[in-house]
Image (cartoon, grey):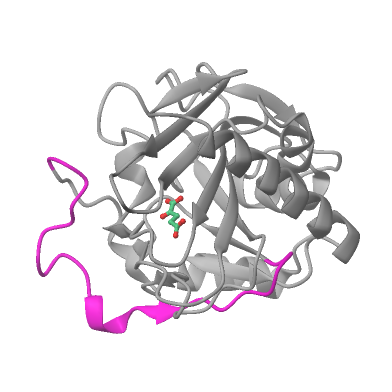
Amino acid sequence: MLTEAQQNEFWTEGYVALRGTFTAEETAALDQAFRRLEARAQALGGPAVVEGSLFVVERRPQAPLRIERIVWCGGAEPELGHFGRSPKLTVPVSQLLGDTEMDQLINQAHIKNPGDGVAFHFHQDSYHRRYGTELFSDVNGRGSFVQALTAVDAMTPENGGLWVVPKSHLGGHIPTGDGRLPDGSFERAAAVPLELAAGDTVLFGPFTVHGSGANAGTTPRRVFINGFCSPGANRREYPGAGTGFRVRALHAAA
Ligand SMILES: O=C(O)CCC(=O)C(=O)O
């Protein structure tokens, strides 16, 4: 469970890093599942649904395959479904959502290999959740969504690690047409790199501005992302999850 200090850090800074969420043995299992996903991706000629997982890939002549994301990766790799609903993630998330029940919307694999150019511009997840439209309601008044990003490899600024803008959540949702935050709507210079060891997890809310650059290092940077909303918040249909895969955290909400 999150300590009070960790919960305060989340609400004050917009995110909190948890060290050693998964054991070395569990992290090795994540690594193996990601390798199998990557082998499946390498066999594809373009975007495809495979066993309930949406592989968003781009094949380019004379360049490495770009694996943009693998949506609902637990379809093709059921072990990733189980890890994504582990109490190690759902209990802290439920503390932050303030409810033992939640709907899982995201169970996703991001694989960035050196030189593949995959990058994520600075954004708020609230855009992707359709905040501000009829498809999402902030039912708990605090964003109603928490994302857990777990490092499968050590994550550094060199290998395309995540950057977060502390306190950027305090201004709430920034409306955009296409998810690209307008110049001046957040303090880009205040972004800090998140260094995680394999098996560590960062939790962040829907308004926390974050992004990551291309992998300019020599090692892969793979992350396992699971996102949960409060029951009743979401009406958007997600691949694999529909309007939400109901999960109950095994504890009483703090
Ligand atoms: O994989 C990354 O670096 C980006 C992850 C992210 O921005 C997200 O899941 O919202």
Q: Quadrant of residue 33?
A: top right
The residue lying at 39 percent from left, 27 percent from top is: 47
Indicate the quadrant of ligand 1 in the picture: bottom left
Q: Nearer the viewer, residue 79 or 193?
A: 79
Identify the magenta region.
177-200
Q: Is residue 119 above or below residue 193?
A: above
- Quadrant of the rendering where the N terminus is positioned: bottom right
Residue 129, image x, y percentages:
38, 35
In the picture as drawn, the residue positioned furthest to the right comes out as 25
Q: Main secondary structure of the magenta part?
A: loop
Asked if residue 16 is positioned above or below residue 41 in the image, the reply reads below
- Magenta-drawn stretch contains 197: yes
Q: Position of residue 254 (x, y in %)?
A: 75, 52
Q: Is residue 229 visible?
A: no
In this rendering, would 167 be left or right of 19? left
Up-down relation of residue 36 to residue 53 (above or below) = below
Q: Residue at x 52, y 78 (%)?
A: 156
Seen at 77% across and 42% down, the residue is: 83
Task: Provide residue 100's location: percent of width, then percent of height.
Answer: 74, 36
Residue 57, percent from left and from top: 40, 37
Asked whether 43 or 37 is in front, the reply is 43
Q: Quick check: 134 left or right of 47?
A: left
Instruction: Tell me if I can see residue 208 in this picture.
Output: yes
| Residue 39 is a magenta residue | no
Instruction: Please name the residue shown 47% across and 54% down the image.
Output: 205
Q: Where is residue 80, by image quadrant?
A: top right
